[in-house]
Image (cartoon, rainbow, N blue to C red):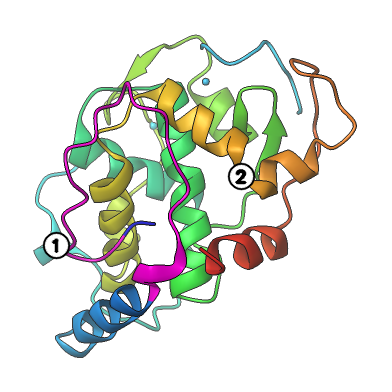
Amino acid sequence: MPKKDYDTGTQSSEEMPSIETDRDINIVEEQRENNRSDSIESFLLNEDPDRQESDGMTDTLNTEENTAVTVNVYDVASYILHKLGDVSTMKLQKLVYYCQAWSLVWDEKPLFPESIKAWANGPVVGELFFQLKGLFTVNENHLLIGNYKKLNEVQIETIDAVIEHYGDKSAQWLITLSHMEDPWKNTRDGLQDGIRSNRIIALEDMASYYSSL
């Protein structure tokens, strides 16, 4: 499980992912509280379920935890790309998914409103996929909509923790991990491998599963 300000180690992207136990959950919660008090897929199957350049980082971000600004998946993707630079579209999709998952656990609310679907190659946000369709590797210049400056400090904290934990992993490593986890597996229950699906992964299932790790 990702942690705030926690060294995730040097596990290579070639290693098979493993689901962590609950032994670190107290550390996660304590670190999160300390942080808050300080101020806080073109490789995807051809499935059809239905970009703002910016400079500067935290000093220009929205610092209000209870901001009324509505954040969408493009804003989250914009921040990830600003931090990481070039990444594959498949990896971006998985990072967005894990941002949503851990926001549900730590912040007790979704980070963005767009639904996540259980596609054959793992969880995918269809709207983001179609914005970047036809591209394999992308950076923030490819995403013509999305503004990471809309994010507040709590949202940034969550995304940063996800990037710290998952950001050095390959797209295939993240796909394999998501295939091992209940939200994607249970949503695709009864479907054969590789079969297209528009089934939506329920937020409740994500919150329940990841909070149990």
Judge left or right: residue 162 versus residue 134: left
Other-residue count near label 2 (Cα within 10 Å), few / some / many at <14 / 14–19 / ≥20? some
Compared to residue 70, the image places residue 126 above or below, namely above
Q: Amino acid at mark 2?
A: Glu
Q: Where does the image place residue 163, in percent across and percent down from the top left?
A: 28, 47
Judge left or right: residue 86 versus residue 178: left
| Residue bearing the label numbered 2 | 181
Q: Is residue 179 magenta?
A: no
* Image quadrant where one finds the N terminus: bottom left
Q: Residue at x 72, y 48 (%)?
A: 201
Compared to residue 47, the image places residue 84 above or below, namely below
**Nearest-to-viewer mark from 1 and 2:** 2
Q: Where does the image place residue 10, in percent across and percent down from the top left?
A: 17, 38
Q: CA distance from mark 1 to mark 2?
A: 32 Å
Q: Residue at x 73, y 55 (%)?
A: 202
Q: Which residues are magenta?
A: 3-25
| Residue bearing the label numbered 1 | 58
Residue 146 picture quarter:
top left
Residue 2 picture quarter:
bottom left
Front residue of 158/164: it is: 164
Q: Residue at x 39, y 49 (%)?
A: 76
Residue 52 visible: no
Q: Where does the image place residue 30, in percent across and percent down from the top left?
A: 28, 83
